[in-house]
Image: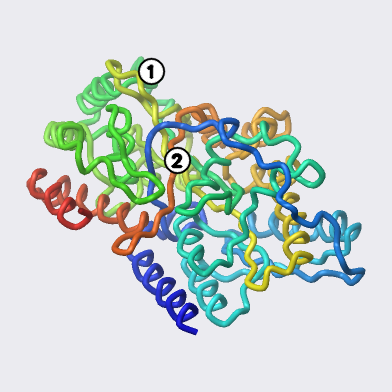
Amino acid sequence: MKKLLSIILALAMAACLLAGCGGNTNTPSDDADKPAPSEAQPQDSTDQKDPKDDGIATTFSTDQVIELDFWHCISNPTHLEILNGLVDGFNETVGKEKGIHVTAYAQGSQYDLDAATIGAIKAGTIPNVSLSVPSYTAAYLPADCVVDLTPYVYNEEIGIEDLDDFYPSFLEQGKEYPQEGMYSLPIHMKAEVLYYNVNFFEEHGLTAPTTWEELIETSRKITEITGKPAFGWDSLASAFITLSLEKGGQFADKEGNIGFLEQDEISKEVIGMWQDCIDEGIWRTAGEDGFFSGPFANEIVQMYIGVSTESSWINQKAVEGLRWAAAPIPYFADKGISAAFQEGHVIEILSQDKDPDEILASWFFVKYMTSYEANLATACGSGYMPIRKSVAESDAYQTWCQENNNFASYVATQSADSYYILPAFVTDTYTAAGLWSEIKVMMGNILDNGMDADAALDALKVQFQ
């Protein structure tokens, strides 16, 4: 009983901290909260030891149909139709063959889904499979209800045979938790890209910048023409982290060790660059707009950085005749280090009674939902990135991008080697999501409210050291 009480209290504390994440509720994705990013260095999943067998059951011990509950937070009508179609497709194929039936339940926003999951953990009524974001999955680990997928993923009989088809950092994210193991698989991913106004760039002989030095100079030229700031970045938290990583710095690891707190010089360089460009009038923050999709679509700013799913909002808001394109995140010419922030939904298996039949059935469903066919259906319609290389390069996906003016997600896949891992840690005093939120607050205080950069950094250190 005491153990159960401590688990419930830990979950409640994590939920309170996560609720302060400050995620943007007007994003084109269904995520209510942003996860917190990690160290810059991309990791190759082939470097990990692949346990082929851990004594798991690969056949069922019952002839009865196994009923599974799948909870999610998808509300966008187009994406919801795709998701429900995939669930039906599973029930009619793999499920029918193996005696499995899945029922999908929408739980509202990602925040609502998390609250429902925590309540279900307390009541012992958790779903078999759920969408999540890594910061929430980390909060469920102390309750010992998240299934380690490692022995299933790598099993020679029922595992994923084409793991090399996944973008490595997406798989690695499933291992970036405080506990050893793989506790999730990618399903709906997005990454930051540089959006720019093709009409404006062609008219004035400009090209998409590849380095920050080029971007600053291009910003000056645009501001000279328009009299307005030329560039912005949707997320000030990812702006600070990405630029710090590209300067050669560190961020945090999955144990919650925060490396950037010991790198004042890099932090001040990054903040100083932002302050100088804002003072010069060539950059701006989103401010009351919240996101740059609106100002960009209305040609108020001519380029900005946002996640790949922003493209759907740009297309909805665009003035007549706007032609836009996307490019990879710039890098510093003297460093040559590329970093790109990525985030999104993961899919996980939950179990409190550790019923081997239900876990095995859940695995077959998760495997189906991350298959080539399922990912192709999701990418062609939802705006999320392909999680598989073969989907990104397929004729069907390329055609969909062309017909829907939506190449941002494809461009984002071109930076796959630059994605940085997002560890999802929950310590006794802070969470990854909480750290993300406070960096966002710090940057806003400095750039929007004129707070002294040294004082803001010192305040962050006091809070997290």
Residue at 49% across, 79% down:
4
Residue at 36% across, 71% down:
16
In the rendered image, is residue 361 in sight?
A: yes
Please rate how many residues cluster around mark 2, counting C-alpha atoms within 10 Å: few if below 14, some from 14 to 19, many from 20: many
Residue 46 rendering spot, x and y as whole percentages: 60, 31
Give the residue furthest to the bottom. 1
Question: Could you tell me the amino acid type at mark 2?
Answer: Ile
Mark 2: secondary structure: loop
Residue at 51% across, 43% down:
190
According to the image, label 1 marks what residue?
Answer: 207
Quadrant in the picture for residue 48: top right
- Residue 34 is tagged as none
Mark 1: secondary structure: loop
Q: Is residue 53 above or below residue 210?
A: below
Residue at 42% across, 58% down:
33
According to the image, label 2 marks what residue?
Answer: 421
- In terms of depth relative to the viewer, which is nearer, 384 or 362? 362
Q: Is residue 238 above or below residue 85?
A: above
